[in-house]
Each structure stands twice: as structure tokens, then as C-alpha cells.
Amino acid sequence: MYHLVLLVFLALAPYTHGVVLQVRRDQQNSSDADIFTTLMDALKPVENGTYTENVTILLLESIENLTKSFELKNLSGFSLISETKTYIQCLQPEGLYFLNSTDIYIDKILLGKCGFNFTTITLRLVSWPAVFLFENVTNITILYVTFSESKGTALKLLDCAGTIQINNTLFSEAQVPITTETDELIGGGSIYILQKKTSSDVVIFGCMLSSNRLIGEGYTRGGAIAVIYHTAYNSLYIASLYLNGNHAMIGSCMYIAFVGDANHNRVLLYNDKVYGHKCYNSTSGINIKYKCIGSLNFQFLPNPQSPIAGHNSVTIDSNEISKNVAFAGGAMSVSAKRQSTEIALTNTFIMINTLMQFNRAQVGSTIHLSDLPGQESGYLLMPILQLTITNSFITNKSNVTVGQGTIYSNKMSLQLGPSYAKIRDSMGTGIVMSGAQVTILPDTIVTFKGNIGKLGGGLALLNQASLVVQGRSNVTFEGNSANDKGGAIYISNYFDNYALPMTGVQCAVKYNETSFFNFTGNMADHKENAIFSTSVLSCAENELVNSSTAPPFCWSNWYYEGSTCSRQVFTSPATIQKTKPSLSINVFPGFPFPLPIRLVDDYGKDITSKFVVSAFVIEGNSSVDSSSQYIAGGNTTIYAVPDQIITVAIETSEPRVVYTELKFNIQHCPPGYYTVSKESNIKGMDCVCGKYPSNVVICNKIISSAKIMTGWCMTYDTELGMGVVGPWQFFGHNKHQMEQDGYYKLPSTLQELDEFFLLLPNTVYSANGEVKGMKLLYMDASVEYGSSKHIWLMMISIIVLSLIVIPLPLILLLYPLQVVQRCLHRTHLNHRALRAFMDSFQGCYRIGTEKTRDARSFSSVYFFLRIIVLAVLMSAMDSVVEGMLQVMTMIMVVCLIVTVQPYKKQWNNTLDVFIFCVLILVKVTILVQSVSHQLNKEFVALGIIMILLPLVYISVYVGRRLFKKCYKKKSKISGENEDVDMFEVDFADRVINPREYEPLLNKTD
């Protein structure tokens, strides 16, 4: 690591010695200078060789037009300066070409819309426009120059040598077309430096490069700056630059490459701000043709067999890189080819004291590291990062994958430190290492905080990647989360051949005993989880590794705040255990079902997180649904011919495969479904729901049953292979008794004589929903409607309806009316036995005395209510609608009781209201369960409590009466009160029939 401590500014080129060519409109003669009216007039004698040494063109006018390009060769000392910031306007895309010259000095000019396509010696096969083209020029100074809306690269330097100074210069809004694809590394929207034969020391200081754009395909490099070194001992110092909104496909801001035999070259970026570069993929139709790689792009492309290539270094110090967008490496991309291991030279890449925030990319939202195609073995660059990364995001947030990450490395190892490294609050795994090693240097504090990934919130180690923590370092994982596994760390390292002796080398995590790990508040899949490893066997502390008895990742100096190691560390399945005997597993064709397996990890714990499990048939005429070939959460679907036993293989996916076999007994389709053949590419059969009317049945494969609407029951005909409909609200398989003719018969508890249902016919449907010609008895699907077996039941039902069910509520409703009472009195039908019978039903109701209404007709309400409930049941409507009607009816009854107050004793009114309210709550609870199709424990408990409330009340009531009976005696006053009550009960009757009560009144008197 090195720092450029002092920036040396070159003195202004003296134009008092040599030739001074003044450009001004005033034509007064001057003895010591030649005067020209235009810049083009002044450049002509320089181009034709009239002036070649110490030539100064002094611009004294504010505007100059350039309509021709000039080639200036073999100059020794040339200055183009202005005292008034002259604006040179290119009416056509033109420029200046300096060749084989020395000491070029340009100061205080402004160039607009310039750029000419010169043919060069260095790049014979490719060319693109440039404003100033320098080829084989030694010592160049550019000060206080503005390049605006250029039509080519502002400064193109080909094999220039000596000192090159570019200070306080503005490059803005260039549009540079590069249309020729070549093996050459070309680009540079503002500055292009190519060193193939010579070496140079370049300083770019205090410049602004904004909104420059390379127009071309995926081979464009360096939207603002492109530097390519083929030679040795070059230096590049880029300091205090502001780079914003530039564009190229590779390195939208800057591209620097070390090629071939390049060696001992040094690059330093210091105190620069790289902001707002947004590079989007080039598309061809709907396909991505080229992908944007890195806002800053560094490539090490050595000749693998070169004995001198190497010792090239890049140092990025105290920079801020923010709000940049790319496909890979939103802020920066570093890639390299491998060198032969026989060559002891190395390249270095160091980043220190750098802040990177709000960058976005699909792969490596901040930094992308990768090896480039070439030889498979050999030395590869190992970057060193001391940095802070915050608030970086992946561009496709809806599909967060482990392959993205804030820092993503593909086979390129990485070092963190020295001193510190922080990665926090980023949408994407903090660091993803694939086939490489991340090393934490000694005395380094590394913090992963608040990062969110899919597999691994803080760190993901893939494809035999590893973590090495050196002495006295502290690694903290705080508040990271993963959508799937490994809230802090995800490790996918699995060695197939565990029969070989294991050593600590195979463990993915290696640490010095003086280092510390801290885990706080890390989550995976919304559960407490710090570490997930596909296997911990390679890290198992046994006699093959060392003598420690601590389980993996529960070692000393590993701290899990507020938790324990056993609750924080998980692995992939080590074994698959069966939860049921194979032949006891019954399944329906085409029905999803949970696999009867337990996944157990290396620690012997049940695995509760989801894993991809593959299921495929190895024996039997069946298949697994292709859409369910990879199943999460243990569910799958089998299509098979019923009445057979099949064998299914169950295995977990890579990288760790465990295997078992299960046998399944394929059942006939449940009632409500019928069997159809699957498509030609899938073996077996599928259970399909019958095409019943919407008010008959709703099938639900998820719970392996059919939801039958009120008054219907789906049944199965074994002879015809069809289903029929009978009276059952909810169907559960094997809950009904099958008779010889194939119809399900209701349980005996429901075979009670019901005069309404005996009169109701029932339509019969086949399994596919077609109406059959026959009619069945509603109460019993085994009895045909109108058959001899049904006739005598119908006659009994009609008699009961005519003599009991309908007359009784009508008598109770009409008997209290005065008109009815007078008619009974005049016809002498109001016998004492009739009054006693009616009094047994109506004695507890108010009789209209003491300014109250006569409420004895209320005794018929409950009989009519029963008829209404039966009518609702016979309507065969949806169970939810039926339940809502029942609730509404009970609410109306409650309102009627509260309004009428029919009972003499207020306690009875309160009791009825209470009972109906409890029934309403019970029914509402059942309705909620029915609509949600879920059995909620809280609702079940609430329903049970409300059902038990009346029993509690009865117990209290009976106990209270027994207590009074045992410890209290009735007084005479209470007896007299009872006589008075008896008198009040019959008062209305006495008013109507005074003769019947004359003997009793005389006796009382």
C-alpha cells in the first residue's frame, strides 16, 4: 500500500520564449508576435511544419469555430492557452491529433461538440472519435479545460510517456459512438489511456466527469475513464474526482486493466466520489445480449506463462461510492485470470477507508469478484477490503436468491481488514463466497448487521468455500435474517466420502482460539436461527480432529446472546425416518397428502424448516405429478389405478442426499369424486369432483373430502362405480355404513321417524353430476321414494302430522282468545280436564291481570319454531346460509321475549334470553369454523364453554333449591301467598266462567 503525499504541479509553459501566435480580431501589428484572426489560421502553420518548437497559441477572443481537424506532428513544446476561457465550437465533429511530440500544454479553454475519427498507428484496426488524440507524446498538461457535449473521447492517449497531468477539468455529456467490435480493450467516454510500448505517470486531480456515455454494445469499457496497461512501471493517481452518471457496459464509470506482460504498475484512487451510474443490460428482443459489469471495473489479464507479469497493484483509499446500478457489481467488479504457480510474482488489490452505500445489482449489489476463463489452476488475485457497506440492494427484490449478495465472489478469495470491515442494512446476503476463502486478518473487527438474504443473512459459504479467522479478531452477526435458512451464516459444504478419515481441513470454518464470534438476534424463516450447515460432520470434534467434546459451532469463544447453541445451529437432513408403517399409508389418486416422514439432522433433532424432497415411483402403475416432483413441506400427489400397492422413493436434493422408500395403498376415490385417466404423459388415474349443482356439493382435495351442502350426502355405488346423493351435511370418508346395493345408510341415531322428511323425495345424482331417473327417500338413501316400504311410513307420517304436529301449536295459539273461550263455554267443551291440560302448557305465562298483556299464546312459539327449523333443513341450501337463518330466527325470538316478557316470573324471561344468547354464540362459532375450513383450537374451546354454561346454571339452580328445602320451612304466609297465586292463575277463567267457581268462592268466604 502506498500513498502519494505531495501533488506536484507543473509550471505554466513559458510563451515569452519561442513563437507566440495570437488569435484576435484586432489586426494591429506587433513586433514580437504573429497575429491571426482565427484559431484555424493559427493552427495551419503548426500543421505544415512552419512552427515546431516552443509554439504557443494565445486565444484572446471569447469564441472560436473549428471546422477542420488538424494533425500536429513532431512538436517540441506546444501550448494552447486562453486568457478569457475561450469557447472553441466545432461546427462539425472535429479535433486535434498530436503525434510524436513532447511537452504539450493546454489551459483554460472550453470545447463543445468536438470529436474526429482519426486513423492511428497504435490502433490500426479500430478507431473511434476523439477531441484531443495524443499518440507517442511525452509530457502532457491539461488544466482548467471544459469538454462539453463531445462527439468523441475527450482525451485519447496512446503510448504516451513522461508525466501526464490532468487537473481541474470538466468532462460532461459526451456521446461517443464505438461501433467496431475488436479484441482490443477500447472505451473511455472522457479519458482513454493505452500503454503498449512506453510507460507514463498520470495524475488526474480535481476533475468532474459527468453524464458521459459510450454508445455501443457489450465491448464498451469505461464510461468516464478507461486505462489499459501492457507495459511496466506505469503509475496512475486519480484524486478528488467527482464522477456521476457515466455509462458503458463494462465499467460504467471506470475501467482499468493489466494485460499480458504488464508488471510493476501502480494505481491509486484517493478521495473520489463515484455517484449515480446506472447501467442496464443490453437486450435483443426479450433476451439479454450483454450484461453490465461494475461501475468501477478492474481486470487482471496476465499472460499465465509470462515470467515477468505481476506486481501490479490497485489501491482505493478514502472513497465514497454510492447509488450505482449494474447487473453484477453495482459499485465495483474485480476479475482476474490465474497465473502459473511457478511464477512468484503477485498482483494486489487493496481497498481501505471506503464507504459504499445504496448500490444495486443482481449479483453482488456492491462488489462482484470472479475469476476469468483461462487455466484452471494457479495463483489468483486475493483482494484486501477494509470498508463500510450500507444499504445496498439487489435489483430484483421479489426474487432474493443466495447467488446475489452484497459482496459476491466466484472462486476469488478475499481478505477482510486490517482493523475493520462493516456490512450492514443491505438487501442481500452480506458476503457470498462460492468455491473460495474469506480470511479475516488479525486484530480486525468485522460486523454483519441488519442484512437480509435468502440463504444466509450475513455470510454464505458455497461449493466448498471457507471462513478463516486469524488471531485476536472479533466477528459479530447482529440482527441479520434469511428468508429460508441460516440467519447469520449459511454453509453448503458436503463431502460425499465420509468413509475417509476426516480432518479439520475439511471444516468450512477455521478460527484462532484468540478470536471471538458473537451472534445476536439472527432469524431464519421468522424463527431463531444463527447458523445452518448442510452437514457438520467435517467439523465434528472427534479423535480424528482433536480431543474437544464440544459440538460443531458450539466451541469456546462462540457466544449466542440470549440463547443456546443447540437452538441456533441446524443442518440439512441426515436421515429420513418413517412415521407410519408403509402398508398403513392409504392415499386417494390425485389427492395431495403429507409424506409420513421425519427429517432428522446431524444433531438428532427434528428438522422443522422446509427442504426440497423429491418423490418418484419405482414400482407400480402410477406416477408423481410433474408439478410436484420437487415438493416443499412434505406434500405430494400420486396418480394411480385404485386397488394396488405402489412403492415410492423419497430422497432429499443436493448437496446432501438421503434416501428411503415408502409403500402406499391406493384407495378408491372418496364419495363426491369419480376416477378418470390422466394425460398420456402421466400414468395412472385421478379422482375428479363430480359436476354437481352448486347447492349440492363442494369438493376439497386439500382435506381429502367433499363438503356436502345441507340435506345432502355423497355416496358411492359399488356396482355402477357412481355416486348418489343422500341426507348428510358434511361427509367424511368411511363414516357411513355401506349396504349391499352400494348406498350409504345413515347411522341408527338419525333413523328416527320424522314426518316431514318421510314425505320429501330426493334427487339421485351420478358421480359426474348427472341426474338419474330414480327418486330416493330423503331420510334413507336405500329406500326408493314411493315404494311399498315407503308407503306405510308415509301414512304414519301423514297421521302424525294431521293429529299432533300441526293441531297442537294452533290450539296453544288460539285457546287464550276470548272468542275461543266463549265458544267453548257455550258448547260446554271447556271441560276441567281441557283446562288442566292447557294449564300445563300455559300456566307459567302472564294472563293479562295487573295491566299486563295476556301472553299465554306465546306457548305456541316454540312449536312453530321447530317447524321453521325443519323447513330450513328440507330446503337443502348452503350450510352457511342455513346457519345464518337459524341465527336470525333466534335473534328474533330473543327480541320477542324481551319485548313481550311472557312469563310471570322475571327470572324465566331472563333465563330464556340467556339460553338463546348462548345458542346464538355457539352457532356463530360453528359458522366461523365452517367458512374458514379450519379447526381453530380457540373457537373449539369457546364453543365447549358456551355449551356447558346451561349445565352450570342448572347445577347452581338445583343446588339452591335443595339448600332452601333442607334448611327452610314454609311459613303460613307463604302458604297464603300460594293460595293467592293459585287464585291469580285462574282469575281470567273465573271471569269468563263464573258458575264453575261459585262453590269455591262460597267456601272461601
Image (cartoon, rainbow, N blue to C red):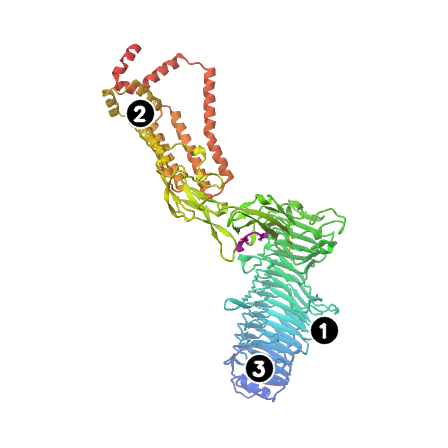
Residue 698 falls within the magenta-colored stretch: no
Give percent across and percent down for residue 577. Answer: 63, 46
Give the quarter of the figure containing the N terminus: bottom right
Whether 804 is drawn above or below 194: the answer is above
**Tag on residue 306?**
1
Residue 615 falls within the magenta-colored stretch: yes
- Earlier in the chain: of badge 1 and badge 3, it is 3
**Tag on residue 822?**
none
* Amino acid identity at mark 2: Thr
Which residue is identified by label 3? 118
Q: Is residue 91 something that shows in the picture?
A: yes
* Amino acid identity at mark 1: Ser
Determine which quarter of the picture holds residue 347: bottom right
- Earlier in the chain: of badge 1 and badge 2, it is 1
Secondary structure under tag 3 reads loop
* Amino acid identity at mark 3: Phe
- For the residues labelled 1 and 3, the Cα–Cα distance comes to 33 Å
Q: Are marks 1 and 3 in contact (CB under 8 Å)?
A: no
Give percent across and percent down for residue 61. Answer: 52, 81
Please give left or right for residue 893 compared with residue 134 in the image. Answer: left
Give percent across and percent down for residue 127. Answer: 58, 79
Q: What is the tally of numbered marks visible in this picture?
A: 3
Determine which quarter of the picture holds residue 254: bottom right
Give the quarter of the figure containing the C terminus: top left
Foreground: 222 or 898?
Answer: 898
Residue extent of the magenta highlight: 610-628
Please give left or right for residue 263 compared with residue 871 in the image. Answer: right
- Earlier in the chain: of badge 2 and badge 3, it is 3
- For the residues labelled 2 and 3, the Cα–Cα distance comes to 116 Å
Whether 241 is drawn above or below 18: the answer is above
Which residue is identified by label 2? 852
